Amino acid sequence: MVKKGMFSIVMPVWNRANIVSRAIESVLSQSYGNYELIIVDDGSEDGLDEVVRPYLSHNVFYHTIAHGGVSGARNYALKQVQGEYIAYLDSDNAWHPEYLLTMGEALNRDNPPGRVAYCRCNVYKIDNTNSALRLDSVRGENFNFKSLLSGNYIDLNTLVHAKECIDRVGFFDENLRRLVDWDYIVRLTAKFEPVFVHQVLVDYYLGLADNAITIIEDHDLAYHAIVEKNKQFDRPVTIFHDGIGYQWENVPDKLYRNWLRMSQGDLDTTHFLADGYPFMLQIEPTNLCNLACPFCPAGRNDLGRERRSLTLEEFKSIIDDLSDYLLFLVMWGWGEPLLHPDLPDMIRYATSKGIKTVTSTNGHCFTNERYIADLLTSGLTTLIVAIDSLKQDNYEKFRKNGSLNKALEGLERTIKLKNTLGSNTHINMRMVITKQNEHELASLRAKAKMMGVDRFSVKTVNPSCDSPFLDEGVVPEKPLYQRFAYKKNTYQRIRVEADCSYIWSICLVHSNGDIIPCCYDYNAKMAIGNIHTRKISEVWNGPEFRELRRTVTCERDSLNRCKNCDVNFKLSKTGWFYESVDFRKERAGGVKMHLAQGLKNLKMKVGSYTQTWFGSS
């Protein structure tokens, strides 16, 4: 059982009977008394036990094991710990009396508490001229994960962490002979954001022990082994959304390490804390719409909330709150985003913060050329245009009150305007494939290519947000076009056990400021706050959101909307997208093939001419 507030101190020792007393006494001198000291004798042969035994008490313990190296000794101790927190002190170093008290306060400064902290240390060296110890430097700096991947600047003797971290990070790597501290700290901080305490609270003595790993083990061999082992933590920032991969270069370290932690996939099912903040956010600019689509609650007037648009200032406050973490913004909810007059300014503000953006439209708001030009020059990354059929009667079945000609003509004008402006916005013509339009796939793809869009994508249909299921009347007959797997000869979905990753990684802000855990919660029955009273950063790991994560994870059937969410059903081999064709690459390939053929022809002509010319000479 974990003892609340207690520090378990891990001290491995091997043949250091002559210097270990200073380290032990620095622990006994701590102003914070709730600790246990676990000394592990790693097969010493220098009478270490005679030095250590006088210190043993109700909270100082001594274990002897066969010699196996420092990692094995630390891991042995970690399996004995009873404290809520773990600290490390090597036998040749010492803590200042206020070390444990200060580090404990640092961990508990915020709510929820931090789980890793480190401080600065004095580095002492032996002066070769008189053999006296002298202060050489002060070690420790503000946390930067990319710098840590290049080399360690956090000494293990300055580090504390919650015991629970071991469950998610594991133990010290016993296969490594040197730089084991660095490897462990990389893995620990790749998962948990550390608190940096600027005070100097540790004395580190370099070269005091003649059997130190820094003396007897090869540095370069260990360095390259650890770099290779942890290269998974040094990779390009990539996000896949709606069948498109987005990449970032030269991302600030704080953004990078938040993305890294949030991308690792393992979930904290003890405290239900997310490992960082959302790097992707969905914002509903407006819930007003100009169509009446039968499968959309906005189109059916079933939203159950006021019709409203988010103001530009409200939008900016959301971005400012999360600007240290946001990489990607989905700008739609239940409504037509292009009805919002300030949408271009919203996109422009997000772009100024380095955030990529995507929005989606039914194509009926392309009439105002000035507005569309403003949108195309705002920095918008992707514009999705929904065109599901090339026949008006079929088109209107799902885009009720919509005009196919208006959408197509508007899209054509927008493509021309984009090319005129030299805009980098990626235009994606989107088809949601259903039983009613599956026969039109080839003609829609050809139309998209002919019009000059950048991409054509085909999304499979999910005909309900909760219940009842309407699969039989809407889902395509061809299995390759279906999102879900079904029981044989039926449209009955197959239930599976699966985690909901959505509530750990993203949330939605409705146009009235409600903070919603999932886009399917269109009427805000599961709202967990509002930006007008609390920031998303405050709500994200607050008690309400953590309780919701617990309920969704452990008691999902108690939430009807979650019980019938598509995460509970087996996907088909196709899944969410049947295809996503990048016509830009096709065109580039076509140009390359054309150029290659042209060069081949040119070489033939040049060759013939050269031969003739030389022959005539």
Image (spheres, rainbow, N blue to C red):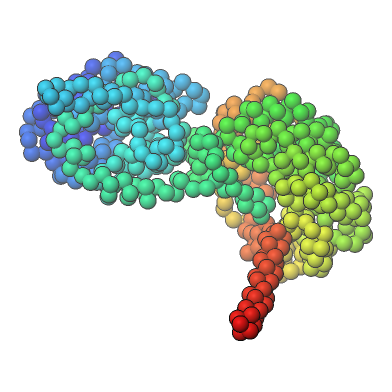
Q: Position of residue 413 (x, y in %)?
A: 87, 51
Q: Which residue is found at the position 21% from the left and 30% from the top?
A: 206
Q: Nearer the viewer, residue 503 or 335?
A: 335
Query: In the displayed image of the protein, which residue is found farthest to the top?
Result: 31
Instruction: Indicate left or right for 464 with 569 as reference.
Output: right
Q: Position of residue 364 (x, y in %)?
A: 88, 47
Query: In the displayed image of the protein, which residue is found farthest to the bottom?
Result: 615
Residue 538 in sight here: yes
Number of residue marks: 0
Instruction: Indicate left or right for 116 with 411 as reference.
Output: left
Q: Which residue is found at the position 72% from the left and 35% from the top?
A: 348
Q: Position of residue 467 (x, y in %)?
A: 74, 49
Q: Nearer the viewer, residue 565 or 117?
A: 117
Corner quadrant of residue 575: bottom right
553 over 490 or under it: above or below: above
Corner quadrant of residue 4: top left
Residue 554 in sight here: no
Corner quadrant of residue 471: bottom right
Instruction: Indicate left or right for 433 with 289 as reference.
Output: left
Q: Which residue is found at the position 78% from the left and 30% from the top?
A: 310
Q: Position of residue 45 (x, y in %)?
A: 8, 39
430 over 152 or under it: above or below: below
Q: Nearer the viewer, residue 81 or 406?
A: 406
